[in-house]
Image: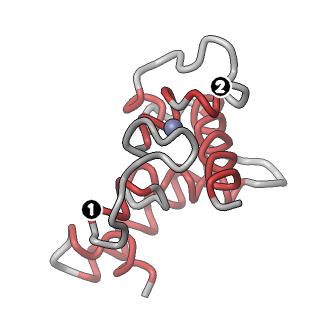
Amino acid sequence: MISDLLLGAHFQDKACLRLHMIAIVQQIFRLLPGKQGIKSDAVQIFRARAKHTLLLADRARHGWSATTACRLCGEQEESIAHVLTECRELADVRPGGWPTVPLNEILWCGNRVAMTTAATIMRKFLRRAMR
Ligand SMILES: [Zn+2]
């Protein structure tokens, strides 16, 4: 079950977890409307909020990776903060002046532009890291 995979460790009651997940994903889908890439953007934001991304820092926390070093630059831990705001190998992907607000606000504030930009950066990172 995907709910078990994504958030199971944080919730004791599985029925409560499912309701929580449905509410979160519906909320994010409403915030990121559009014809193309919405599900992808919403899923990226959902994963970032839940700290269940495909990044090595999250994977190592679950024992699924032996290393946390960034797959692009190799200089720092491959975390959400690193990918969204620090990794020099993604400098060409981030818009000028990014980030305009602190990381937690990007993921949680409900600002469509900030969340879509964060989702785009995450997707481009994963595409490059998995080459
Ligand atoms: Zn990096």
Q: Residues within 10 Å of mark 2 (few under 14, many from 20)?
A: some
**Left or right of residue 73: residue 20:** left
* Residue 108 locus on image (x, y percent): 42, 37
SS for dot 2 = loop
Residue 116, compared with residue 46, is above or below; it is: above
Amino acid beneath label 1: Arg
Q: What colour scheme does the image use?
A: secondary structure
- Residue visible at 28% across and 76% down in the picture: 8
Whole-angstrom CA distance, mark 2 to mark 1, is 26 Å
Q: Hey, which residue is sitting farthest front in the picture?
A: 74
Specify the quadrant of the image occupied by residue 92.
Answer: top right
Pointer 1 residue: 61
Q: Residue furthest left?
A: 12
Q: Residue furthest top?
A: 97
Closest to the observer: 38 or 97?
Answer: 97
The number of numbered discs placed on residues in the rendered structure image is 2
- Residue at 53% x, 15% y: name it: 100
Labelled disc at residue 91: 2
Question: Which of the two residues, 34 or 71, is positioned nearer the viewer here?
Answer: 71
User: In x, y percent, where is residue 63?
Assistant: 28, 71
Do the residues bearing badges 2 and 1 touch, measured as CB atoms within 8 Å? Answer: no
